[in-house]
Structures are given as C-alpha cells and as structure tokens.
Amino acid sequence: MKILCIYNHSGPKLHRIMLPAILMPGIEIVVNYKIDEEQLQGVDIVFFNRMVFGGIPTKTITPKEVIQDVLTLRAKYGFKLVADFDDHWRLGPDHLLHEQYRHFKRSEIMEEMIRESDAVTVTHERLAEKVYPLNKNVHILLNAIPQFDQFLTQKIPDDKIRLFWAGGVTHKKDLELLRGPMKLIKRDKVKFILGGYERKNPEWKAMAKIFTCNSSYNTEVIESLPVQEYYHVYSKCDVALIPLV
C-alpha cells in the first residue's frame, strides 16, 4: 500500500498522520505539504489532518469549490481520501484562531472535507458522534505516544518536584484554569516548568505570566523546539498539568 501523507511539521500532523504511517509495517510513504499530481501515480490513500486544499478560499467561492481540485484528482487517480480530526472543526468566539477560521471559511471547508472523504479518523467517541451525521465511515484512532525516536527521551533528575506544562499558543484559556491554583502552591520544594515558549509572541508572554505567577523563583521557561525534537522538554517533567476548557 502507498500512502501520501500531508505534513507541514505541525504537532497534530506529526502525531496523527506521520507517526501512524511510519510505524505501520509494509507501507510505502510519500510526504508533501500539499497534493502534488506528480506524486499521485500508484497512491492508494491520501491521508491528511483537517484540510487539504484544492483551491484558494475566498469570499466568492463555496467550500465545495475550494476542494474541487482534490476531488478531480481523486476521480482521475483513484486514491481514497482519509481525513483525520483531532479536535472539533468549529471554534468558540474566544479562540485565538476564531476570526481567521471565519474569514477563510475554514470550518465550512473542513465540514466539506468530512463529507467528501472516504473515511474519517478521530480521537474519541464524542468527536465521532459529531462526525457521524456528515460521514458514517468514521473510526476512532486514539491519541498515543509511541516508544520511538524522540519519545525515548530519558528524564533528567532534579532535587525538586517539577510541575510541568507544555503546549502551543492557542492554549491561553486552558492555562487560565491554573491561575488560581498555581498561586496556592508553595515553591520551596517544587519547580514550575513551562515548555513551548515563543519569546516574540505577546500571547505567549501572557501565558507564561499565568503559569509562573509572574515569578522567576524555582521557575524555568523553555523555548519552543522543532516538532521533531519537542518531546525532549519532557525530560524535565515529573507531574504533567493538563488544564482543558
């Protein structure tokens, strides 16, 4: 079997597209950030996360027209489209990317991708229930960390217990849940470790202040690493905090 993996070095695409394909025995893999017709000969599956563009979205064309080029290529080459969704495709108004999604019709395009795909994979049952009315060929592919490559990182010892959070810039609302609890923790025997920080991003500066209680005492803020290396920061994790709105 030959799979074209749509991959742009993002975290979701690493975990949900690349790693499952790489670790599947007997699979020939082709990788690109888009569908390139020159690579489609003999491809059985085009595997993507959320979206794969056929055209450029504007206010004057429908979501179906945006993906029409992809559907035309499928009809020509006979591959199956498999869409993966690790989260809901509609964002709340307080989400950092809400306005971008609205302007470029991304939610509507994703819904069209769900309808037109030959199969859809999701992370859990609740998300499968949301997909089912749009595409009944939906399957649960659980999130997992493989024993492979960077995920074999060994823990670095420390004399203090490290309370740890790492993530991306869209998680400010999640970190807000920790604002009060973090202030209640005495820091003489623990450290606060924050991973994924981007120095030039004002949103990240606000997130770091929330997590560290705006204090440098027994605190370490670790800058963002490339996706193929990011898990090394977990070498400094004793207790992972996972706030989620």
Image (cartoon, helix red, strand yellow):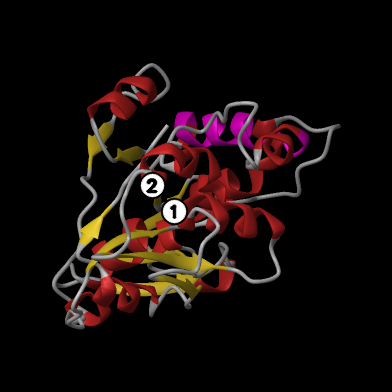
| Residue 84 quadrant | top left
Q: Nearer the viewer, residue 10 or 28?
A: 10
* SS at mark 1 in the image: strand
* SS at mark 2 in the image: helix
**Can residue 44 be seen in this snapshot?**
no
Marks 1 and 2, Cα distance to the nearest angstrom?
38 Å
- Nearer to us of marks 1 and 2 is 2
Residue at 40% x, 74% y is: 30
Segment tinted magenta in the rendering: 103-115
| Residue 121 quadrant | top left
**Type of residue at label 1?**
Phe
Residue at 42% x, 31% y is: 245
Q: For mark 2, what is the residue?
A: 182
- Above-or-below relation of 93 to 98: above
- Above-or-below relation of 95 to 39: above
**Can residue 177 be seen in this snapshot?**
yes
- Above-or-below relation of 53 to 126: below
Residue at 33% x, 56% y is: 16
Q: Which of 157 and 39 is in front in this view?
A: 157
Q: Which of marks 1 and 2 is nearer the N terminus?
A: 1
Q: Residue 172 appears at what percent x and percent y?
A: 54, 45
Q: Nearer the viewer, residue 154 or 159?
A: 159
- The main secondary structure of the magenta stretch is helix
- Residue 238 placement, left or right of 86: left
Q: Residue 25 appears at what percent x and percent y?
A: 13, 71
Considering every residue shown, the one lying at the far right of the view is: 60
Q: Residue 76 appears at what percent x and percent y?
A: 52, 53
Residue at 62% x, 29% y is: 108
Determine contact: label 1, label 2, CB under 8 Å. no
Q: For mark 1, what is the residue?
A: 48
Which quadrant, please, contains the N terminus? bottom left
